Amino acid sequence: MSIELKNIAKTYDNKNWILKDINTKIETGEFFAIVGPSGCGKSTLLRMIAGLIPISSGDLQIDNRSVINLPPRERNLTMVFQDYALFPFLDVEANVGFGLKARKMPELKIKKRVAHALELVDLTALKTRKPRELSGGQRQRVALARAIASDAKICLMDEPLSNLDAQLRGKMRSEIRELQQRLGLTLIYVTHDQIEAMTMADRIMVLNNQQVQQVGSPLDIYQHPSNSFVGTFFGTPQMNILKAHCPHTHNQQLIIDPFLTFQSPLDLPAGDYFVGVRPVDFDLTTHVTRTNAFVRSVEYLGNEFIIYIKLDDSAEIRVVTSEKIDLNSNERVLIRPKNKFFIFDHSGKTISFMKGVQNNGRTSKQETQAIIQ
Amino acid sequence: MEEPLNRKLKPLSNKSVTLKTQSIEKSSYDVNAHDKFYAWFFLGPSLVILSIFVFYPMMRTLYLSFFLTNSLGHPSVFVGFSNYINLLTSSAYLDSLTATLIYVIAVSILTLVFGLLLAQTASKKIAGINIFRTIFSGTMGVSVSVAAIFWLFIFNPSIGLLDQVASFFHLPTINWLTQPSWAMTAVIISTVWMNLGFTFLIFFGAFQSVPKFFYEAAEIEGLSRSYQFFHITLPMISPTIFFISIITLIESFKSFGLIDLMTAGGPNNATNLLVYRIYQDAFLSGNYGSASTQSVILAIIIALFTLIQFKLLEKKVTY
Amino acid sequence: MKHFCRLSRGCPIIRKLLLSAFALALTLVFLNTHVNAAERTKVIFWHEMTGPAQEQLNKFVANYNQSQNKYTIVPQFEGNYNEVVQKFLNTHGTDASPALFQSMDISTNQISSSNYTTPVQKFIDENNYDVSKISAVARAFYSKNGSQLSMPFNTSQPVLYYNASLLKKYKITPPPINPSYSDITRVAQQLYQRSGKKVKGLSIEIYGWFFEQFLANSGVALANNADGHEGTPTSVSFDNPAAVAAMRWIQTNIKSDAFMNYGSGSNASANEMAGFLAGKLGMFLQSSSSISQLTAGTKDKIGVTYYPHPDNKKANGVSIGGASLWISNDKSAQVQRGAWNFIKYLMTPKNQAAWQVSTGYLALNQDSQKEAVLQKLYHRYPSSKVSSDQLRKTMPNTTNSGIFMQGLIQERTFIQTAMEQIYNGGDIQKALTEAQQSMNTAVKSANKANKAKN
């Protein structure tokens, strides 16, 4: 079942907009993630799709039929909550069958469905337990089973993994993804965790400042962020944003310091810009006489290092390297670009995606010009 | 993150545990005297206070219950269990017991039901609901004497509010406080009214603490409001219901103020509850022996009720 | 503050001045208490009076303390009658106990048999005090074997009040001054019928005192051994013909709907009073001390009669109610004498007259009748003289001098329960017999506990 959001907006007081101009179409069987920092309105958007919160303006269509005036139940969807919404006084089986029982489904049919759902999430053995006797991951799976049992083809998930520890989260990510594909669910998945979005979703909608920043596949979003927010939001450690200066028009030089200059693929008018560099895209040299930065601290992650470095012009950057290096605090180093970077204008909008030396971005030269003017 | 750490520590921690137990066993002999001193030092004062104000009166009450007391209130004749036998075979006492049971059960149930209703009403998001929340919790600030005056005015036989309303609608007027059957009703109404403020507040707090997502989940399942109330709200607040029911039950067994001020146990002993009877026997008639016997019986009854309640309800209160 | 500190620390003269002023103040305080303690003996006086009676009592205390310099009476209000009995018994022999205290009529036997008090007879004899001036019925209530145990104080008798203006409005002949049961029934019925059932004819509060008075006025003893005046009672009689007749009279009126039942307890009398003052009730039995509240509360003319008596039988006269003053024996002779002197002061004709005028309690000193204030009261409200007359005309005998026994509080509880049953249509004989059985059990057990000789 497809879901289409048309100019959806939300306000509580007709003055301040929580969300506006939300447009997208989610295809049948798609895993669609809505991601953004806390307070960006992603949960509100999800609840509007569910029908728990009325939509202030715009239209919502499921299978090309407007559902704006339908109560949640008639939208034929199911929802998994951050805190699982498991009833502490019911055992696993009763929790999974709660909605079915309330809808007065025959007892035998409920039993069958619940058994099937529990089997899918591998919880059959624990069906007589109470929620408090389960681990976080098991509770999460009960919530999933409930969604499965309801047999709705659309499933909404609101930060379903945020209460789990990192390891379990990783495991559940693949389990959810697998289930979604196996059951052919159209899944809308809200999260603040970019890794979840990147690893699970077919497409991602990035929300910030009440608006959609970008909609695209994980790869697209990572490689072609539409602005510095999207650029910094995806990828760990975060992309470094450096203030750069272009001294002359047609010069194509973006200067941060004498050693750290970036060659723009396009002509830029003279002025101030932002250069975005992912931590892996710096070249770090030690034991040289000419340096432009010093080491603040080093974190060792096993397979790579995160090095916190302060440039002489006082900007702080993060550099990731997998080379085995021996660094001391306050050691002087030389930081140079690897020529893989993004250029953003003063408002953060992307001007250029640089990969190697040639323009790899989708923004053509003409378009860039148009943006700048 | 935690997993590998734990795994790493496991063999280590096993060792340290065995080490610890050894050290405790070894040192326990030397520390004992010291510990004993501290135990007495810290527990002693409260033990003394408890003995004076709790244990002694309890034992004294039990002791007195086997005696007749003279006009000075001193135990004078040991009568064994005859105080108990006399009471339990006295129809007046048994009537009192029945009246108390009716009162306690009616008050407990009505307090629970109306407390829940008020809390449910106040949980609705309507403009001006805050005013109602204040009004509903209002009786918490009302003293028993003020409440008694208020209800006495309402139940007044000549100029009372209720009878004026009744006569306005040409309904028969009721002598609320002088007819035995109605007096109990009147006292129950007043007590429930008195209880409501506190009960409402506790229930309202409990309602607010039920996570919103349960109701959202229910909305998505398309469950009706009443189904949500009975199958989500009530079970979720069942520990609170249990708490309130025990508190109300014990409190109503101990009801005194409203009875004293409104009916003084009358008419025809219809509202002569056990506690009021004890007061009358001890502090008006000076029959401390019989009053002590009644106190002991009352204590047993309350203990029994609480026990039954725990047994019955602990199955329902499952988390 | 800072400024002051600096001064006192900095300059020695000021510091010295301050110090000496403080010392002087201290000395004065000590001297003052010392002077008082040396010259005046403190007499703690417990009472249970409220409202106008409390005001008047405090006035007496203030006047007395001013009139002499040997004693200081310290009045302390102790709550209701019922609780004070146990309070007195439990505090006796401690610092908290009073030297002089007021205790209600029906506690007389209990207080006297505690042996915690000095009978006032001792001081009467010492002083050759002339008690004959004090009302005989009142004295009889608080004496045993000719010895005065305590001094009657706030004293009232039950009377019948009627709203004379209402009776006049409906052209009903008022009841005679010494009415029989059927006289009252007649007025009650007429008032109820002629007012279009808007005004209830009669109310009698459910109160053991009234029951006792029905027996007293019929000349029938409630307890054996002549109501305890000739020995400790061993049994009581509630279901005698006199009691049944009185209850039947009440039930007749209840059945005709002319009777208003206000129940029992202090709420009952308050409601009854309110109903009467609002013109919704024509007649009721109440203490003679209610008169001042009634005359203050309505512009209607109020009539008063003696306590109703059985048909075809002469009234034996009713006993009194109220409370008396006792002297505790755990205080020094000097303190006890102080208490006695204050009692004497209260009993003077002048003070007794003032007492009746301001409270409605009856003046017990016969000479009070000549006092100008009382004469003025009688002139203004002639009906207020009726209760004084009733008291004066009553010849004391064993059946109208109160019941001298313990456990009367319980007796009243039992009686009131029986009355409640009767008022609600219950069987008279059955109700009274049950109450009588309960009381007899209580009497037996009390006598056993007190090891009384039969």
Image (cartoon, rainbow, N blue to C red):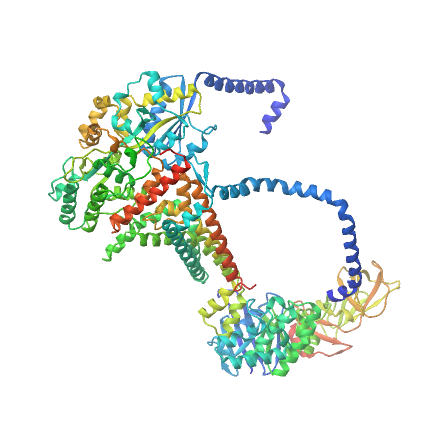
Relative vertical location of residue C295 with respect to residue C149 in this rendering, above or below:
below
B63 or A352, nearer to the observer: B63
Where C31 sits versus B179, above or below? above
Q: Nearer the viewer, residue B61 or B104?
A: B61
Q: Give the quadrant of residue C281.
A: top left
Question: Is residue C450 visible to the viewer in this orientation of the structure?
Answer: yes
Q: Position of residue A130 (x, y in %)?
A: 59, 68
Q: Quadrant of the N terminus of chain B?
A: bottom right
Instruction: Using the image, determine if residue C233 lies above or below residue B21.
Output: above
- Residue A311, quarter of the rendered image: bottom right
Name the residue at 39% across, 35% down. Answer: C79
Q: Nearer the viewer, residue A339 or A319?
A: A319
Residue C297 shows in the view? no
Describe residue B139's horizontal placement relative to residue A343 as left or right: left
Horizontal side, residue A366 vs residue C82: left or right: right
Quick check: A324 left or right of B199?
Answer: right
Residue B110 locus on image (x, y percent): 41, 58
Task: Give the percent coordinates (x, y) of residue B162.
Answer: 29, 53
In the rendered image, residue B199, in percent from the top left (x then y), is placed at: 46, 55
- Residue farthest toward the front in the current orientation of the protein: C454
* Numbered disc total: 0
In the picture, which quadrant includes the C terminus of chain B?
A: bottom right
